[in-house]
Image: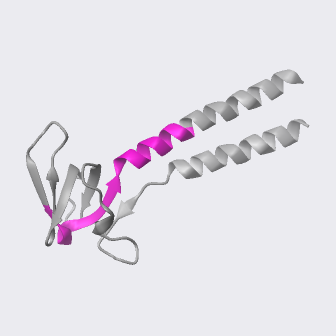
Amino acid sequence: MKASVLLKSSLLTSLFVISSCATTKYSEDISKNNYSNLQAGKMYVVTMKDGSPKQKMLFRNIDGDNLIGTAGKKDSAEVIIPKSNVAAVKDRSKARVTAGAAVIGAAGVAAIVISSLRAD
């Protein structure tokens, strides 16, 4: 009985760990994803091809070959990033939700394991 509970809890833990690594990426390659999936009013982290620091941006729209947004919800400074300089765009909100779910799930699995160990 003890081994089956530990096996189940380890499978659940590995599932949560794998899902916590998931993040949504957008790139220039249409086979991977294209920029038309970016949603106005969402925060994204843009990684540049030239090695410059990652840039956070509240996405507004696409104008020709540029991604346009603002530096943040409270900062109204306009940010214009050429598509040709973008290596990847990551959705921050989905990564936070997934990480939070992984932490809650891991705590639940730990509670099950501890309670099963005390029951014996």
Q: Quadrant of the N terminus?
A: top right
In the rendered view, does 106 fall on the left or right side of 96?
right
Q: Residue at x 70, y 27 (%)?
A: 111
Residue lying at the far left in this picture: please name it. Answer: 77
Residue in front for this viewpoint, 109 or 33: 33
- The colour style of the image is one colour
Tell how many labels. 0
Q: Position of residue 11 (x, y in %)?
A: 72, 48
Numbered range of the magenta stretch: 81-102
Instruction: Quadrant for residue 4, please give it.
Output: top right
Q: Residue at x 28, y 52 (%)?
A: 45
Q: Position of residue 70 (x, y in %)?
A: 14, 48
Asked whether residue 49 is in view, the answer is: no
Asked whether residue 36 is in view, the answer is: yes
In the rendered view, does 3 fall on the left or right side of 99?
right
Q: Is residue 39 above or below residue 112?
A: below
Q: Position of residue 87 (x, y in %)?
A: 28, 66
Q: Is residue 68 above or below residue 58?
A: below
Q: Quadrant of the C terminus?
A: top right
Q: Is residue 108 above or below residue 71?
A: above
Does the segment drawn in magenta span residue 89? Answer: yes
Does the segment drawn in magenta span residue 84? Answer: yes
Q: Residue at x 8, y 45 (%)?
A: 77
In the rendered view, does 69 fall on the left or right side of 9?
left
Q: Is residue 26 above or below residue 76?
A: below
Q: Position of residue 116 (x, y in %)?
A: 82, 28
Question: Main SS type for the magenta part?
Answer: helix
Residue in front for this viewpoint, 74 or 45: 74
Q: Residue at x 37, y 70 (%)?
A: 33
